[in-house]
Amino acid sequence: MKNLVCIVAGEPNSINSELIAKIWKRRKNFKNLNIFVIGNYLLIKKQLKLIKIKLNINKISKIKEKNFKKQLLIYDVPLKFTNPFKVSYQAKSKYILKCFKIAVEFAKKKKVSGFINCPINKRETFGNNFTGITEFLAKKEGVIGKEAMIIYNKNLSVCPVTTHIKIKKISNQISKKLIANKLITINAFFSKKLRYKPKIGLLGLNPHNDELRKNSEEKKIIIPVIKKLKKRKISIHGPLSGDTAFMNLKKDKFDVLVGMYHDQVLSPFKALYKFDAINITLGLPYIRISPDHGTGRNIIKKNVADPKSLLEAIKFFKNINART
């Protein structure tokens, strides 16, 4: 359904139920979009009671045409727990993966226009199998190496070519093919979903691009990719020096800055926009978004969590649907 989006409840030991409740109370912000939650009904009910948030929720087991505005509907997924904020590792890992499986199935069958997943503890959920949800879903859909994780803000987005890997491994991981695939995926997403061709800035790997020496990654890998993609009419510029790439954003008017590694672009981006951003996985056969923050374990039950990023994720779906 075009105007229906599901929210995966995510990590049980978190602020997620609080965030979901807070965005539901602000549903006038997305009045043309319907949402429901995939999670455990009893867990969410007990968590909301403990943090003293009153919310009209109801349990469902099927997706069918109905008024989603009257109450927040929970597509119930089994979960064994005693303490609603201290669910065991074994129970929650199985539960989270089941929630993702259901969301992916709904999205691929076009029952929903996509899904938003609330934060999870990646290590406790995936163990050593995956470094993040982006990699997990890309492997599931057979698009490893072609997916792109962008942190999106309407003024600027960023994307790391490599994601959650050690700094010492970055140089050996980047390649012409990998960088080109990421840039092609980004360009296709903006062109098809947002209806405009993005201006992309590509950062080098080394300080000052290693002065473009013959044996630098910039000279051997990055510049040849830029030349190749310019021939394909992709608006790609660089290599940009990492220490100045974020200084002249108003003048350069880049839509996306792509870096070689995670913190190269995410650290300055978060300094600029904090939580006014969302995480989107590009290259999947459906749209998957998550808030750009963690599980908030240090503020569980304090009722101080900021729902801004989750609200922005919902608004993004609203804007995408308005364009199609």
Image (tube, rainbow, N blue to C red):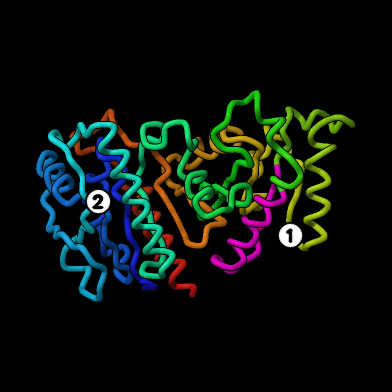
Q: Report the amino acid beneath label 1.
A: Ile
Q: What range is drawn magenta here?
A: 180-202
Q: Report the amino acid beneath label 2.
A: Gly
Single out the mark in the foreground, 2 or 1: 2
Residue located beneath label 2 in the image: 39
Picture quarter with the N terminus: bottom left
Q: Is residue 179 left or right of residue 279?
A: right
- Indicate whether residue 200 is drawn in magenta: yes
Residue 223 is situated, as x and y percent measured from the top left of the image, at 82, 44
Is 66 placed above or below 198 here?
below
Q: Quadrant of residue 246?
A: top right
Magenta residues: mostly which secondary structure? helix
Residue at horizontal 18 percent and vertical 40 percent from the top: 80
Residue 234 is tagged as 1
Residue 130 is situated, as x and y percent measured from the top left of the image, at 48, 37
Residue at horizontal 47 percent and vertical 31 percent from the top: 128
Is 13 placed above or below 56 here?
above
